[in-house]
Image: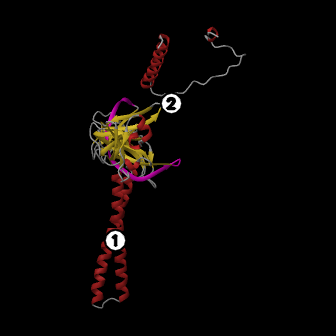
């Protein structure tokens, strides 16, 4: 064999070896397969409902008057602290006192007439029993007696009414509290007609407040008594106040086709920052769980593709016959080069993660998503020869 022929044989062997090395060591195709996995994690699950409401006193009483007249004296003003039974206002009593004296005179007159007719009836009855007077005289005496008695009873009832009206002219506080509103001035005339005019509004205890929040009908099903609440008010943007759901009212309110329900939230107000009428932005925590085992929500929707797994050198075990339903879902746990199906019980959803109540343990790694990534080529853009050349392209090598 000549030297030249040996050289050609050696060159061919080198080409074959190089081609084999390239086939073995070449990088993956541009459309490579990726399998995204994620381990189970312990997280805090917190779901909430947003709403707006108004800060109000827990107990608020409107003090009015049941008689018409002129406000004679006012003894309290805005923000004054009052006690139950304390005198807070008086109305002009001249007219009411005159009515009382007139009623007293009428009562005395009716009493005199009643006593006279009683004596007359007693005498006539005695004589009638002895058959000394006729039945007509007896009936007339009895009639006059009954008329006088009824008139006397009516006068006594009128007397009670006048005395009560005179008592209404002295206005006292019904509860211990703080005056948050005063609607009248001294000398002002108030008329108690079909409704009682309000003179004062008294709040019982401003250290205990409540927020009446309007919750949308789509969220009201998640709200329960006793749930934790946090809220802020514009007056103190850096402060967050805490409260508790006290009551979910059943009456619905419809405004502009939007249905809402009132939720009453109690809150402590020891420093008196919360004032009646403030608008509150409310967050009601409908679900709170600490140290909950969770996986990405996408893992519950993952379905393995045998062909794609084969390109990764992995396999998937056969799924159990029982199908996932309700809160039961199937996730695929990574065990070396094998995906094992695991039936789990799903719980609450928080963001992009779902709580797993049973079926998984700490440290399990689940498959989340599988995809074939393709490399996109930059499309060529035709350019008009009459268009100006972008900066820098004029110097490119032609």
Looking at the rendered image, the quarter that the C terminus falls into is top right
Secondary structure under the numbered disc 2 in the rendered image: loop
Secondary structure under the numbered disc 1 in the rendered image: helix
The residue positioned farthest toward the bottom in the image shown: 131
Give the magenta part as a residue range: 235-257
x, y percent for residue 135: 35, 89
The residue labelled by disc 1 is 113
Proximity of marks 2 and 1: CB atoms separated by less than 8 Å: no
Of residues 107 and 30, the one drawn nearer to the viewer in this rendering: 30
Residue 315 in sight in this render: yes
Q: CA distance from mark 2 to mark 1?
A: 115 Å
Residue 266 in sight in this render: no
Residue located at (27% from left, 85% from top): 126
Residue located at (35% from left, 72% from top): 150
The number of discs equals 2
Of residues 240 and 192, the one drawn nearer to the viewer in this rendering: 240
Magenta stretch: helix, strand or loop mostly: strand
Among numbered discs 2 and 1, the one appearing first in the sequence: 1
The residue labelled by disc 2 is 374
Looking at the image, residue 36 lies above or below residue 145: above
């Amino acid at each position: 064999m000549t030297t030249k022929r040996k050289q050609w044989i050696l060159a061919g062997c080198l080409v074959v070896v190089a081609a084999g090395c390239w086939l073995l060591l070449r990088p993956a195709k541009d459309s490579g397969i990726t399998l995204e996995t994620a381990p189970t994690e312990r997280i805090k699950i917190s779901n909430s409902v947003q709403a707006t409401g108004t800060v109000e006193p827990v107990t608020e009483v409107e003090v009015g008057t049941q008689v018409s007249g002129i406000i004679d004296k006012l003894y309290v003003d805005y923000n004054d602290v009052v006690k139950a039974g304390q005198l807070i206002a008086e109305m002009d009593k001249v007219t009411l006192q005159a009515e009382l004296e007139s009623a007293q005179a009428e009562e005395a007159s009716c009493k005199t007439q009643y006593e006279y007719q009683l004596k007359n009836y007693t005498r006539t009855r005695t004589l009638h029993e002895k058959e000394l007077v006729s039945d007509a005289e007896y009936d007339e005496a009895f009639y006059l007696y009954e008329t006088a008695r009824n008139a006397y009873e009516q006068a006594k009832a009128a007397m009670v009414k006048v005395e009560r009206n005179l008592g209404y002219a002295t206005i006292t506080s019904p509860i211990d509290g703080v005056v948050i509103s005063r609607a009248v001035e001294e000398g002002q005339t108030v008329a108690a007609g079909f409704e009682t005019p309000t003179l004062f509004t008294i709040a019982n205890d401003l250290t205990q407040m409540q927020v009446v929040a309007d919750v949308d009908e789509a969220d009201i099903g998640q709200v329960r008594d006793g749930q934790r609440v946090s809220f802020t008010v514009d007056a103190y943007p850096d402060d967050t106040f805490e409260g508790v759901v006290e009551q979910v009212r059943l009456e619905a309110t419809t405004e502009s086709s939007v249905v809402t329900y009132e939720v009453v939230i109690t809150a402590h107000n020891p420093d008196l920052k919360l004032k009646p009428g403030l608008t509150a932005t409310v967050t009601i925590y409908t679900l709170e769980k600490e140290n909950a085992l969770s996986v990405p929500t996408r893992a519950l929707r993952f379905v393995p593709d045998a062909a794609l797994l084969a390109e990764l050198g992995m396999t998937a075990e056969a799924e159990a016959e029982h199908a996932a339903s309700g809160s039961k879902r199937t996730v695929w746990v990574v065990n070396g080069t094998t995906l094992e199906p695991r039936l789990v019980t799903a719980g609450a959803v928080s963001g992009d993660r779902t709580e797993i109540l049973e079926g998984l343990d700490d440290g399990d790694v689940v498959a989340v998503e599988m995809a074939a990534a393709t490399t996109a080529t930059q499309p060529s853009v035709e350019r008009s020869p009459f268009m100006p050349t972008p900066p820098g392209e004029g110097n490119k090598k032609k």
